Image (cartoon, helix red, strand yellow):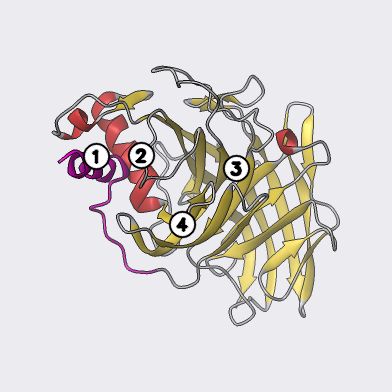
Amino acid sequence: MKKSTLTLAIMALMGSSTAFAASPNVQGSSSNTSGVETGESNHILFGGGNSGVALNGASSYIDLAGGPINGSNNAIDDHGNGAIMTPADMGLFGGLSVAQVWKADAAVNGGGSTYANFAINSVRQITTLSFAPQFGGLVIGQVGANSTGSAADPAQPLSVGEGVYFGEWAPRADGTPPQDSTDLNMASSERTVWYVGDDAVDTNSMPTAINATYGVIGINGVGTTAGGSPDNPNLYTGTLTASYSSGSGSLSGSISRGAASVNFNGTNIHDNGRFSNGSNPTIEGRFYNGAEALAGIYTGSSGAADDVAFGGSKISGTITP
């Protein structure tokens, strides 16, 4: 009975009743596979073959859209930002505090009329359960549908099958987690940045030419002084320009947050849908959805605290299939 109740609690939290068809080409990466591995979701409760993450050495990948994103949104809709999720919140017995959850939106327009929109979900785990992912904090950025004239309110994430996700993970801190805190333990030296998408561009689907500008945000240290609170994260923002033809090209521009910035000049676009800035890259990522979106990670030289996960969508220019 105890195991059955806890299973139902996790299913409620993660929204496991949501079912999706498998995505066409799930691909991604992370800065530390001991913390986060990316792949097709195959968890027994929240799988489906879409963009997933395996956290902290777990053997299965949890579906991002059908799991933590859906569960967080349900709790926030019922109880507001910063809600404490319990089994009772979903009509179950008991008052077990499972997680605290937040949501925020962001937009970048680069001076034009088209806005790239984003949703950011943050989850702080309180109670660990053996069959659920184990972590201290998980922040999930999602590329949303573009809007014209103003930022979307709220942002509308891309549908499953086209989803593009990026973010950060941190392990649990020592001791008993508090009931109410915005500290996701992102100051941990084990903090990991990651990205993954449902429909990655590869050699077979790489466009003939790309001449486009992307509105981009970067996630770094949500819940810390620099990274802002989970309900109002302090993000990197900027625009990147892709110029690609005849099997090669470049990605230029920068994203910044105050005095800190990530410069993409010298980043090469490859004919397999990937981009990187060298043989031992500090910037790596790939295009998704026919190059209408992109995501990746920057791994700084000063340790995990500097690492940034980024994602964006095309706000101007042309893509030739």
Using the rendered view, name the quadrant where residue 79 is placed: top left
- Residue located farthest toward the bottom when viewing the structure as drawn: 204
Q: CA distance from mark 2 to mark 4?
A: 19 Å
Residue 52's disc number: 4
Note whether residue 158 is visible. Answer: yes
Q: Which residue is mark 1?
A: 6
Q: Is residue 270 magenta?
A: no
Q: CA distance from mark 3 to mark 4?
A: 29 Å
Residue 129's disc number: 2
Q: Give the side of residue 92 with respect to residue 122, left or right.
A: left
Instruction: Give the amino acid type for the residue marked by disc 2 in the picture.
Output: Leu
288 or 54, nearer to the observer? 54
Where residue 319 appears, as percent x and y from the top left, is: 62, 70
Instruction: Give the amino acid type for the residue marked by disc 4 in the picture.
Output: Gly
Mark 3 and mark 1 lie on one chain; the one further toward the N terminus is 1
Vertical relation: 93 (above or below) 292 = above
Of tags 3 and 1, the one toward the viewer is 1
Q: Which residues are magenta?
A: 1-22
Mark 2 and mark 4 lie on one chain; the one further toward the N terminus is 4
Mark 2 and mark 3 lie on one chain; the one further toward the N terminus is 3
Instruction: Give the amino acid type for the residue marked by disc 1 in the picture.
Output: Leu
Where residue 54 appears, as percent x and y from the top left, is: 49, 53
Instruction: Say how many tags the image has.
Output: 4
Note whether residue 163 is visible. Answer: no
Instruction: Give the amino acid type for the residue marked by disc 3 in the picture.
Output: Asn
Name the residue located 42 percent from the left edge and 41 percent from the top edge: 155
Q: Which residue is mark 3?
A: 109
